[in-house]
Image: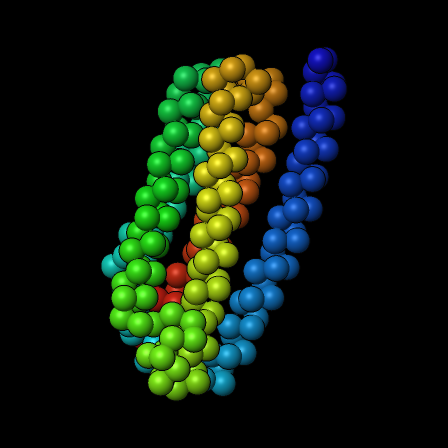
């Protein structure tokens, strides 16, 4: 494949990923808007519910995702320099940190579930309607975000394979670059979720 064809494919792929991310922005933007409306109407209850969140674990997960974004960006830079071995290592570290994020989130969820705080649980239904809304939004929004993290981990795992087999090179790295854009988007979503659920006490 000639350089001009690679360039055309790269541009087409980039337009495609930006269109996809635009639809994702609309999707998450709708949830953020819904959250804002409910929080405005139930400010006191949201503050009470948010006080039960684990700020330390939320902060650790924020640091984990920000570091993973650095690694995937560095992996793309390594491919551009022709250093596929380093790129594979950096992508592997990104996958590892993504998995760490999900494990921490699992323990956060389980801690709440053990205390009986989960959708339609007897314990939750005894709380105020505002607190019920808060935890409902928490499970939905962090759950959907967690699903996006899992998808990102899966896609990056394929990118590792493609990099190792020479399908991704310094001349043709569009797939990895677009995967990096997706991963950065997932991280940005978390940067918005973190203060909404952990920093409003």
- Which residue lies at the image location 50% right of the left edge and 56% below the top edge? 144
Q: Quadrant of residue 8?
A: top right
State which quarter of the image contains the C terminus: bottom left
Q: Quadrant of residue 25?
A: bottom right
Find residue 188 and report its horizontal and vertical position in percent.
48, 52
Q: State whether residue 183 is above or below residue 197.
A: above
Q: State whether residue 201 is above or below residue 128.
A: above
Q: Residue 161 vs residue 30: left or right? A: left
- Which residue lies at the image location 56% right of the left edge and 32% below the top edge? 177
Q: Residue 48 vs residue 41: left or right? A: left
- Which residue lies at the image location 72% right of the left edge and 33% below the top edge? 12
Kindly give the residue lying farthest to the front in the view shown.
122
Q: State whether residue 41 is above or below residue 88.
A: below
State which quarter of the image contains the N terminus: top right
Inspect this view and state whether residue 112 appears.
yes
Find residue 33 and report its horizontal and vertical position in percent.
57, 71
Find residue 13 and report its horizontal and vertical position in percent.
68, 33
- Which is nearer the eye, 130 or 197? 130
Find residue 87 and report its horizontal and vertical position in percent.
43, 23
Inspect this view and state whether residue 43 appears.
no
């Amino acid at each position: 494949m000639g350089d001009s064809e690679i360039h055309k494919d790269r541009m087409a792929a980039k337009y495609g990923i930006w269109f996809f991310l635009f639809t994702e922005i609309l999707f998450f933007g709708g949830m953020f808007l819904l959250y804002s409306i409910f929080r405005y109407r139930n400010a006191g209850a949201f503050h009470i519910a948010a006080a039960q969140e684990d700020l330390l674990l939320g902060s650790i997960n924020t640091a984990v995702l920000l570091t993973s974004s650095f690694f995937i960006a560095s992996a793309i830079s390594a491919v551009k320099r022709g250093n596929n071995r380093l790129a594979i290592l950096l992508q592997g570290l990104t996958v590892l940190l993504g998995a760490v994020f999900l494990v921490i989130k699992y323990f956060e969820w389980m801690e709440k579930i053990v205390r009986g705080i989960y959708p339609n649980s007897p314990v939750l239904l005894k709380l105020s309607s505002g607190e019920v809304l808060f935890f409902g939004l928490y499970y939905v929004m962090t759950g959907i975000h967690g699903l996006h993290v899992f998808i990102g981990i899966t896609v990056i795992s394929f990118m590792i394979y493609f990099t190792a087999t020479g399908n991704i090179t310094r001349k043709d790295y569009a797939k990895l670059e677009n995967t990096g854009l997706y991963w950065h988007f997932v991280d940005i979503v978390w940067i918005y979720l973190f203060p909404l659920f952990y920093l409003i006490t």
